[in-house]
Amino acid sequence: MNYRPLGGTGLNVSEIGFGCGNVGGLMVRGEHRDQVRAVARAMELGINYFDTASSYGDGQSETNLGRVLNELVADVYVGTKFRVTTHEAVRIKENVINSVEQSLARMQREQVDLIQMHNHVAAMPEGGSVTPGETLGEVVDALQQLRDQGKVRFWGMTGVGETPTLHQIIDSGALNSVQSVYNLINPSAGVSVPAGFDMPDYGDLIGKASANSMGVLVIRVLAAGALSGEAERHPVAVPTVAPIGSGRDYDQDRTRANEFRFLQQEGIVESLVEASLRFALSNAGVSSVLVGYSSLEHLEQAVDYAGKGPLPLEALARLPEIWAEFTG
């Protein structure tokens, strides 16, 4: 396992992380014995970062992960997430603190290494979105208080929403990390995309984060399974998935994923999964790629593929021709 710095935090995280989300489903719906085996094996393979959220299974992922880590007496880094659920002034701070404390209780931990805001970011405070002003105001105030109390070490956000507002927060230097959608279907967080690109354009969010000493945790590296190369989903995986940061629906993502099969057909990679992981790891600004697992086999496979290193430069050079086709 290779390790990369998580921005300016001083933490070095495994380049493949353990995602505990609902899509893969192992830490939400898996059997306890399978969860223990997978976490233990992940640590044997060198994975040292585990990522969950209060919303995964309505807290079930946090509960399961905390129980397993305690059973294994694991010395690893743990990150979780909260959602801001109010726009009422002076109540956001209390909202964040209560959510984080509930997460710590579910995980049976006194401290979490990384806490992340799990809302969309937008200029207007509508629905579940949070504005840059709210983020850099009461949210950061709450996180600073939690840090002073020893309950969190570092903080970040999930980088989804309106690109200008995401960039505004990143440029502030107030956060330590960002979770970025970055995959073969939509690479805009790490490379320039053509005019007319019909998916969200994150405007080299990874490069901007790196310039601000922020760690980058890649999410949706397999586009929720569209880049797995398999039509059938694992029994513990979520049955249907809405895209985040990619096409208009899952079927379109699967169709576009087929455009990258030349990498497999020409023997550059064994599978689309390998191509996807090695593509993300080709970006030096990436700290860790979070993979959501359904089984121990998925875990072993991800670590094996990552060990092959970034995609060859010749393969990377051919990808823009495909992205040029993804226009409205």
Image (cartoon, helix red, strand yellow):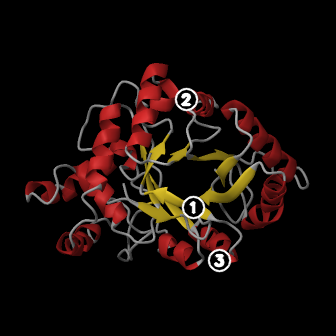
| Secondary structure found at label 2 | helix
Examine the rendering and report whether any part of residue 263 can be seen: yes
Q: Residues within 10 Å of mark 1 (few under 14, many from 20)?
A: some
Q: Residues within 10 Å of mark 3 (few under 14, many from 20)?
A: some
Using the numbered discs, state the Cα–Cα distance from disc 3 to disc 2 in whole angstroms: 37 Å
Q: Amino acid at mark 3?
A: Asp
Marks 2 and 3: in contact by CB < 8 Å?
no
The residue that appears at 57% across and 32% down in the rendered structure is 61
Q: Amino acid at mark 1?
A: Leu
The residue that appears at 60% across and 31% down in the rendered structure is 70
The residue that appears at 70% across and 56% down in the rendered structure is 153
Examine the rendering and report whether any part of residue 31 can be seen: no
Name the residue that disc number 2 marks: 68
| Secondary structure found at label 1 | loop
Q: Judge left or right: residue 158 versus residue 143.
A: left
Q: Position of residue 34 (x, y in %)?
A: 42, 24
Name the residue that disc number 1 marks: 11
Q: Position of residue 293 (x, y in %)?
A: 40, 37
Name the residue that disc number 3 marks: 171
The residue that appears at 50% across and 57% down in the rendered structure is 13
Using the numbered discs, state the Cα–Cα distance from disc 1 to disc 3 in whole angstroms: 21 Å
Q: Amino acid at mark 2?
A: Val
Q: Is residue 3 above or below residue 188?
A: above
Quadrant of res 233: top left
Give the mark nearer the N terminus: 2 vs 1: 1
Of all residues shown, which one is farthest toward the left? 266
Give the mark nearer the N terminus: 3 vs 2: 2
Q: Judge left or right: residue 148 versus residue 197.
A: right
Using the numbered discs, state the Cα–Cα distance from disc 2 to disc 1 in whole angstroms: 22 Å
